[in-house]
Amino acid sequence: MQDSAAYHHGDLPNALLAAVADIVKENGVANVSLREAARRAGVSHSAPAHHFGDKEGMLAAFAERGFEILRDDMAAAFGATAGSPALDRLGAVGTAYVRFALDRTPYFDVMFRSGIDKPSHQHVHDSSDSALAVLIAAVDDLMSEGGYSEVDSRHLTVYFWSLAHGLASLAVDKSMPSDLDEVSIEEYITGVFGMTQGILGTG
């Protein structure tokens, strides 16, 4: 009856994905299984396969949700800084990226560290592109403000993405400099992103 009620109300997929988050947080991505997710969600061991097919399908659904949350977080940061200098807006997007990794580490781990084959899951590929589109918009904003005229926008997007992702990975792995408690993530992002003007030049 529990399975039937969950299916009827549409809550079972959410319950299973919540279970995935708990498993990843407690034991790591490698220990995710359909059976363990079902046990934690309080449903039969066959229930996850009905919705996701296999373990990778369940992780792909979890990653898709993560990219959607990341997109929304970055879009909110970008929108909240409307009217600010473009580099500051880009910094806000980068900060949102790092904050997402720290606050929602299970998603970050599955999205980027689980080994799922993103191209084979169109919904994951599309949601990833949707998140990246926010960063692309922030880079376009920077270029339209003036400067970086000799830089390929695609290269600049990957450059800033690499900075944000690198900082996120360092923060998640607790490998940031020891003074992180005294210097906020926002200050790191602002400082690192701000160096771009000197490194790449403008004009």
Image (spheres, helix red, strand yellow):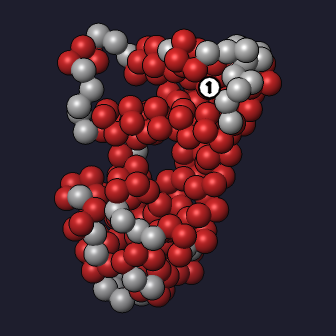
Image quarter of residue 149: top right
Residue at point 68%, 45% (across, down): 133
Question: Element at badge 1?
Answer: helix
Residue 125 is situated, as x and y percent measured from the top left of the image, at 59, 64
Q: Is residue 143 above or below residue 135?
A: above
Residue 147 is situated, as x and y percent measured from the top left of the image, at 73, 18
Residue at point 31%, 33% (across, down): 171
Q: Is residue 155 above or below residue 34?
A: above
Relative side of 49 to 127, left or right: left
In which quadrant will I find the N terminus?
bottom left
Graded by Cα atoms within 10 Å as few (under 14), some (14 to 19) or many (20 or more), the crowding at tag 1 reads many
Could one spot residue 14 in this view of the protein? no
Reading the image, the residue beneath label 1 is 90
Q: Residue furthest front?
A: 150
Residue 85 is situated, as x and y percent measured from the top left of the image, at 70, 13
Relative side of 73 to 147, left or right: left
- Total marks shown come to 1
